[in-house]
Image (cartoon, helix red, strand yellow):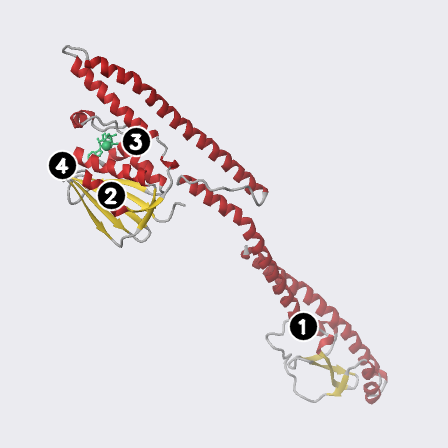
Amino acid sequence: MLLPILTLQLAVTLVFLQRHFEGVTRQMTLNLVREIAFVLDQLETKSFAEVEQVEAEKLSLTLRRWDGVPSGNARDWIDVSGRTVIPTIYDALPGVRDVDLSTRKWVIVVIESAKGPISIGFERRRVSASNPHQVLVWMVFTGLVMTILSIFFLRAQLRPINKLAAAAEAFGRGRNVPIDPQGAVEVRVATAAFLDMRQRLERQIEQRTLLLSGVSHDLRTPLTRMQLQLGMMDGPDVEALQEDVAQMNDMITGFLDFSRNASSEKPVEVDLAELVGDLVRRAGPKADMVVEGKPALSHVRAVALRRAVDNLVQNGLKYGTHAHVTLTHLKNSVRITVEDDGPGIAPKDRDQALKPFMRLDAARNQNRGGGVGLGLAITADVARLHGGSLVLGTSEDMGGLRADLTLPKLTLS
Ligand SMILES: Nc1ncnc2c1ncn2[C@@H]1O[C@H](COP(=O)(O)OP(=O)(O)OP(=O)(O)O)[C@@H](O)[C@H]1O
Ligand SMILES: [Mg+2]
């Protein structure tokens, strides 16, 4: 914003000084030259003393006989208009010997006349415009005022954009910040479009949730009936069928877990060391935990977070033999790291493993209990909901998978 204003001022100043002051100075100098010419004319016929006391006096010119040394057209280097005055006088009057501008307020022109060389003195302000710097002062001053005004104006215009950005970011973290369209037309249109999009997304999420939970729920009843009927049957295939039905039951539990909308849970202040510690204890002797950093309370959706960490710990125990949990309090975030001594996940498969219903290497997993491939997807969802992230890597100490669940502090309200 400042750049165009400064450029404009500079350009205007230069052009103005150049054109205007040069023109005005030349005009004024030519007027004075006419008066000098008149005095020289009078000297042809009248005596020096007479001209000095009558004509020169009337024109406020100081006439002297001259026998000094020429100043060599002296002028200050800073005297810009003097650069125009000197050549104009030389051009317009024949017989000029010297133009002395060395004193700022007085000009002395040395010239040949009918009565020999004379010097003619007059006030400087008669040949160049006075106080040219005032124009500059005014220009800088108005420029400053305009700049300040436009900063205020821009600020007011930027506020709704910032609000919109904040609302969009909050929505990305599962929070609904109220916002109404404000500011310039364009910003209002953008805000309205955002609100529209938010509403549609919410509706879509709601529909997904309803569909998943509805289908899962409705499937439960016939499944239970099948389980009962199978219980009363005999035969070689019954056991396999029973296993299938049990697996379907697990899947449905998984669906219901996944579809349950975690964002409807209210965030609360909890001691994560306690929450995670409790669930590690319940996981049995094959899981352990250490806490690092300065202990602090965290603002989280406790039930969802518990499920997320539990998924990681259960994976560690299922695919490895031991799970090690590290809870680290950092300056602006909390990190929960779960490591195990299992086979880990190859880097190229890590993105896949985070997707819902995705089980890697199905054959290998078959005898490890009926997972549905939702554990990591749910965990990643919960991390996103808290404005955090779930990152998979390789554990340096244990050789298996390392899962980092990072939650920023103070992101929920
Ligand atoms: N700790 C781990 N070590 C090795 N592989 C893992 C580990 N955790 C997850 N995986 C791989 O990532 C896949 C997805 O894991 P995810 O937890 O989402 O599903 P799951 O454990 O198979 O089923 P669910 O957790 O829903 O019961 C798993 O099938 C497994 O192949
Ligand atoms: Mg799992």
Residue 187 visible (yes or no): yes
Between residue 29 and residue 297, name the one nearer to us: 297
Density class for disc 1 (Cα within 10 Å; few <14, some 14-19, many ≥20) is: few
Vertical comparison of 78 with 15: above or below:
below
Between residue 338 and residue 162, name the one nearer to us: 338
Dividing the picture into quarters, in which one does residue 233 lie? top left
Residue at x-position 25% and y-position 46%: 274
User: Which residue in the protein does label 3 denote?
Assistant: 355
Residue 345 visible (yes or no): no
Q: Are marks 3 and 2 in contact (CB under 8 Å)?
A: no
Mark closer to the observer (2, 1) = 2
User: Which residue in the protein does label 4 denote?
Assistant: 321
Q: Amino acid at mark 2?
A: Val
Helix, strand or loop at label 4? It is loop
User: Which residue in the protein does label 1 denote?
Assistant: 131
* Left or right of residue 45, residue 302 in this image: left
Residue at x-position 19% and y-position 17%: 242
Say which label, 4 or 3, has the lower sequence index: 4
Q: Are marks 4 and 1 in contact (CB under 8 Å)?
A: no
Say which label, 1 or 3, has the lower sequence index: 1
User: Which residue in the protein does label 2 denote?
Assistant: 276
Q: Amino acid at mark 1?
A: Asn
Q: Picture coordinates of residue 129 (x, y %)? A: 70, 71
Say which label, 2 or 1, has the lower sequence index: 1
Q: Amino acid at mark 4?
A: Thr
